[in-house]
Amino acid sequence: MRKTDWWKDAVIYQIYPKSFCDSDGDGIGDIKGIISKLDYLEKLGIDAIWLCPIFKSPQADNGYDISDYTDIDPMFGDMADMEKLIKEAKERNIGIILDMVLNHSSDEHPWFKEAKKSRDNKFHDYYVWRDNKDGQLPNDMRATFGGPAWTYVPEVDRFYFHQFAIAQPDLNWDNPELREELYRIMNFWIEKGVCGFRFDVIDQVAKEPDNKVTANGANLHDYLREMNLKTFHGKNLVTVGETWSATTDTAKLFSNPDGSEFSMVFQFEHILLDQIPGKEKWDLAPLKLTELKKVMNKWQTELYGKGWNSLFWNNHDLPRIVSRWGNDSDEFREVSAKMLATILYGMQGTPYIYQGEELGMTNADLDIKDCKDIETLNMYAERLEKGYDVEDVMTSIHARGRDNARTPMQWNDTENSGFTTGEPWLKVNDNYKHINALDEDVDQNSVLNYYRALIKLRKKYDVFKDGRYVDLLPTDERVYAYERKGEKYTLTVVCNFTKENDVPVNISIPDKDKLIISNYCDAGDDKLLRPFESRMYMSIM
């Protein structure tokens, strides 16, 4: 039996099943492939796997359009495979976290097929509709993936609302029968033995489209507390809400220590710092380290004792962090990947590793013909139509496109990186010959072994979980340095965020402090930092 709040000590590993490991040579990763890599994940030291959706889906948005929440998509396997994964992971003390997409379903879900038949059909009210008035859209709201957020259905002479793709109609949480169906689905999986849930765009379920409100609708927290009580409450599961709109104040509700909503939230304030304010994610701006420190300090200090952070740089929607904020050149990729991990893993919260992050995998130089992501392809078409230069559009895609995160996992240096014996569904990154798990496993100085060491440290010292965060150099534009003060230990983290050499450390490190990990092989000078150098010191109070 896991102890209560076990997730505060945990490290979670996110798997994008389509790209992780293909067991049958069809070019698509599957559940049996994941099972075959459980020993690798156990050696890494993780406690749970967040599994992106493996439910039945037409794959309009790579599984985030679900047509059956209680069955497995044949491309990934079947229910017996899923049950085996849960069992074999549990034998290694690894839990399975399911990705629940409860804001919208697929337009091929039986509920929506019924909903389109008649306004009187009971399933009609499972979705968000507005009447057709002279052929005019209900309002001018836009969908995240482009185009209007409303689509007309002639059979009922009404428009349905969709915040994402046309194939992803939004569910109507104001309908209590719909909510009960969703709770039934969650309880089905709890009985199967999963250890928790990640809730996709969960802050949008109480939408108010007439008021152009998508996130944080008036009924949101009432609905989340109801869901909690009717499903996972008191069952020692981990729950995380994806909340793009979260502030530190709302995060205190989402992750209230009383357990009334979720264990923690994903918030994205730090991830939005390198785009032009008020513009789209494709409109690039340089990252200011002082702004990053300011945001991270806010979340570390304002949630202390009042909520819980998720710690992440990457996921299936974000580009590879070593290419984004590190340096993916042959010279600096390894040290900058380790530096970024050091900054994150010294903080309070639950760290999330996105598959391949632990290897220092990079963005891929994909041509538009190689891209598969609906968001990228829609943006490409829209911007060309608006007259944007092709080269500028491709620069944005190479920097921000979601396919960067979705290229197949790089297992070894054989054809297709050992991901598949067939034709991969998405092109493998060309650098797999020198960035792969097999080589890094035996290289003691690899990014992989650095992650293993960081995870062991987090599990050894309570200061990682309980220490109070203090930003030591808030105005320094090159060095990121902070302390975590615990009852017994003080942890000090010092990192050079640049490729500059001999960068001064403008804090004094006491002689009694022990260097517990560094991304350079030799000790170096503790008053000067080499390019992307990172250090963790520990002292006994």
Image (cartoon, grey):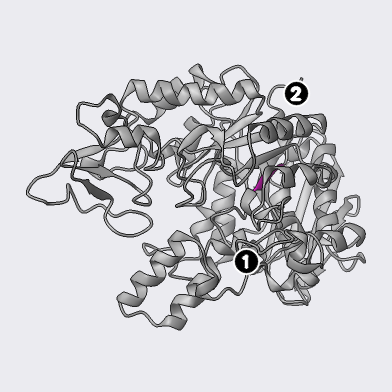
* Nearest the eye: 362 or 481: 362
Q: Residues within 10 Å of mark 1 (few under 14, many from 20)?
A: some
* Mark 1 residue type: Trp
Q: Position of residue 223 (x, y in %)?
A: 40, 25
Residue drawn at (67%, 65%) of the image: 322
Q: Is residue 235 left or right of residue 400?
A: right
Q: Quadrant of residue 300?
A: top right
Q: Which mark is residue 325?
A: 1
Is residue 294 toward the left or the right of residue 446 in the image?
left
Seen in the image, is 259 located left or right of residue 473? left
Label 1 vs label 2: CA separation?
A: 36 Å
Q: Is residue 168 part of the magenta span, yes or no? A: no
Q: Earlier in the sequence, mark 1 or mark 2?
A: 2
Q: Quadrant of residue 46?
A: top right
Magenta stretch containing residue 13, yes or no? yes
Give the vertical position of 284 relative to 104 (above or below): below
Instruction: From the image, state whether disc 1 or disc 2 is nearer to you.
Output: 2
Which residue occupies 81% across, 38% down?
459
| The magenta segment | 12-16
> Closest to the observer: 310 or 348?
310
Residue at the location (13% across, 44% down)?
132
Q: Secondary structure at mark 2?
A: loop
Q: Amino acid at mark 2?
A: Arg
**Quick check: can you spot residue 236?**
yes
Disc number placed over residue 237 in the picture, else none: none
- Do residues under tags 1 and 2 come within 8 Å of each other at their CB atoms? no
Q: Nearer the viewer, residue 257 or 486?
A: 257
* Tag 1 secondary structure: loop
x%, y% of residue 486?
A: 76, 37
Quadrant (top left/top right/bottom left/bottom right) for the N terminus: top right
Q: Which residue is mark 2?
A: 2
